[in-house]
Image (tube, coloured by chain):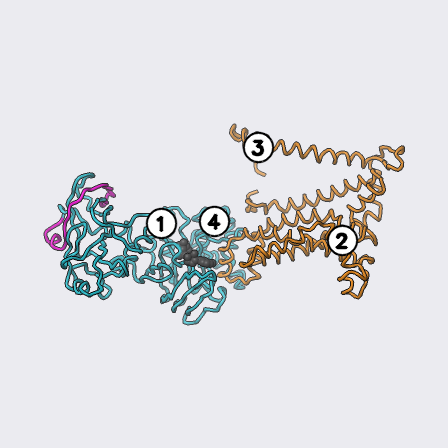
Amino acid sequence: MADIVLDKVSKSFPDGTVAVQDVDLEIADGEFVILVGPSGCGKSTTLNMIAGLEDISSGELRIGGQRVNDKAPRDRDIAMVFQSYALYPNMTVRENMAFPLRLAKLDKATIDQKVDEAAKVLELTPLLDRKPANLSGGQRQRVAMGRAIVRQPKAFLMDEPLSNLDAKLRVQMRTVVSRLQKKLGTTTVYVTHDQTEAMTLGDRVVIMRGGAIQQVGPPQELYDHPRNLFVAGFIGSPSMNFLHAAVEDGKLRTALGDVPIGDRIRRELEGADAPRELILGIRPEHFEDAELIDDEARARGMEFTAPADIVESMGSDKYVYFTVEGQRASAAELEELAADAGADFSGGGGNLVTRLSAESPVQEGEDRRVWFNLEKIHLFDPSSGRNLTLHEGRSAGTLGD
Amino acid sequence: MSRRAPLSENKKAERKLGWLLCAPAALVMVLVTAYPIIYSVWLSLQRFDLRFPDERKFIGLDNYVTVLSNEFWWTAFGVTMLITVVTVAVELALGMGLALVMHRTLVGRGIVRTAALIPYGIVTVVAAFSWRYAWTPGTGYLANLFDGSAPLTERASSLAIIMLAEIWKTTPFMALLLMAGLALVPEDLLKAASTDGATAWQRFTKVMLPVMKPAILVALLFRTLDAFRVFDNIFVLTNGGNETSSVSMLAYNNLIRGLNLGIGSTMSVLIFITVAIIAFVFVKLFGTAAPGSDDGERR
Ligand SMILES: Nc1ncnc2c1ncn2[C@@H]1O[C@H](COP(=O)(O)OP(=O)(O)OP(=O)(O)O)[C@@H](O)[C@H]1O
Ligand SMILES: [Mg+2]
């Protein structure tokens, strides 16, 4: 077990592609860190550099305090789990799991004992003599995990290990991975595309975009206090609503009405080069049916009326889609997120996704009065993507000062 | 083999369609190959020398006894076996090296590939002549390199040159077949082996080779069958002199030069049988390694 430190690590490929740029990351001993980001943002490349499968173009990588830039993968004592499982097709499950131990020249009795132990943990014992071709996807995945844990390596690297499983198995395996990591306490770097995995599995989440780290922090912190537009849009499902907001007379003119702003933000917007147009972000759960709001809450928020297009009742709550008039929110980040998710992120002039209480009597097609929480609003500078509501790492809405 | 369940109607129809679809190809095959084979077998059972056409007579297996107890046959058989084993083994090793180089080369892969294929593209007889001239004392550059010796007049050196010419010609072909096999090895598998602690050599022997096994067997089968019928290089380089005849040469000499249809056909049939045995052995080896059936125990 060991800590992993990436110190200004960059990777450029011979064809000129810069896949990873100046990544600084300190992963503590025993920590479970998740790497997320859209396709092609350099997650796999980062992982491969830690494993030693790709050369590091510049910067330093330290494992357990030791510089390992020039060490071969076999000398780094790290285990990797691949999306494709990468099981050796000619070997049985037992042989697959024993392979790293055999290469490490352990004696046969020790190998058998370790493999049996790992097989027991992963419930693979009855499958030990099968070939990978005769296993289900979930079983193959467990064998791949087994091959990683038998060695008790310094760290686990996992590149989308659950992506090839169906939804139900993925949920099951997620808990398996989580329990295993807690039990073994091995430093783990885990790459995923999956929101839920990112939010539930790790101690900390690293969000990457275009080879650079956007924000690092515990999942809840990224969710509540996103540093920029990209992080805000990437984390959360359904994602944050983004609306165009024009700065006028110390107010924000938006499709939901005029939103008041607090002193601190006002001061920031007074600068000569301050943006005149902003992007306002609100998460779906920060809306509520105005009927269900008590007076105290009403004072903290604002209300608007809009036609409800679609009502999806989830049992515990209702997803209601409203149409609001107004200009589209536009920023490079939003387009990138939309391209990655294959969805439309532009809130203004389009749909507003809200999560209302199940008790709300809202009907499809009717005009509904909706409240939203001003303390939970985020304001972004469209050119830089910076979250203006963030103060000393905390976000306190538009009114905060 | 497990017990066959009775076929459903659907399966039966499918099977029938299968037969119908391969019928034309099978028919042509039978027409063009079965007739000559049967005719050869028929000829091999007769005393039939075109120089003495009147003495044609059915003699059963006498021709086989004659051939199989003849030392020329066994010498030629030994030569053929030697050439087959040595050339195929060397081609496999060289071809694998070449395949790895071509597989790994990122820049100029096309050029490397084309260059490597040139020897295979040259007509064998032409190439054989160029080898012969190269080894001719006085004028040949290779002969001059070795102090003007005449290697094609001695048995051992002749065989070596024949094998060299064969290897030079067909290694590229081997390399191409093996490269197709290399493409079958998933990149992740090699990465996994690297992190599991395998050295480059261990990755090659423990991961690549087993995954490539079907491709290797196909390449070996093709080349072995081909090599066993070696003819043109020997014909040009030594014309079978100094006991360098292969079985194909011997059959040719008896059939076409000697006009002895009986003995010549017998040799052809024997070559056919040997080739069939080699193919059978390889196909048996395939059994567990044929693509798609990577299970050892489910047979
Ligand atoms: N061998 C290579 N040569 C050139 N460019 C490469 C190479 N490998 C990856 N890249 C580029 O580097 C960037 C990062 O790739 P990487 O595989 O790390 O992305 P990723 O975040 O893992 O994406 P995904 O989620 O789709 O797996 C991509 O733009 C990719 O095209
Ligand atoms: Mg990837």
Q: Are marks 4 and 1 on the same chain?
A: yes
Q: Nearer the viewer, mark 2 or mark 3?
A: 2
Residue occupying the point 66% across, 31% down:
B27
Question: Is the distance from the Cβ of mark 3 to the nearest ligand 1 atom less than 8 Å?
Answer: no
- Disc 2 marks a residue whose amino acid type is Phe
Which residue does the numbered mark 3 point to in the structure image?
Answer: B18
Range of magenta residues = A293-319
Helix, strand or loop for disc 2? helix
Chain A: drawing colour = cyan
- Disc 4 marks a residue whose amino acid type is Pro
Q: Earlier in the sequence, mark 2 or mark 3?
A: 3
* Residue B187 placement (x, y as % from top left): 50, 55
Chain B: drawing colour = orange
Which residue does the numbered mark 2 point to in the structure image?
Answer: B129
Mark 1 Cα within 10 Å, few/some/many (few <14, many 20+)?
A: some
Mark 2 Cα within 10 Å, few/some/many (few <14, many 20+)?
A: some
Q: Which mark is residue A171?
A: 1
Which residue does the numbered mark 4 point to in the structure image?
Answer: A126
**Is residue A144 one of those drawn in magenta?**
no
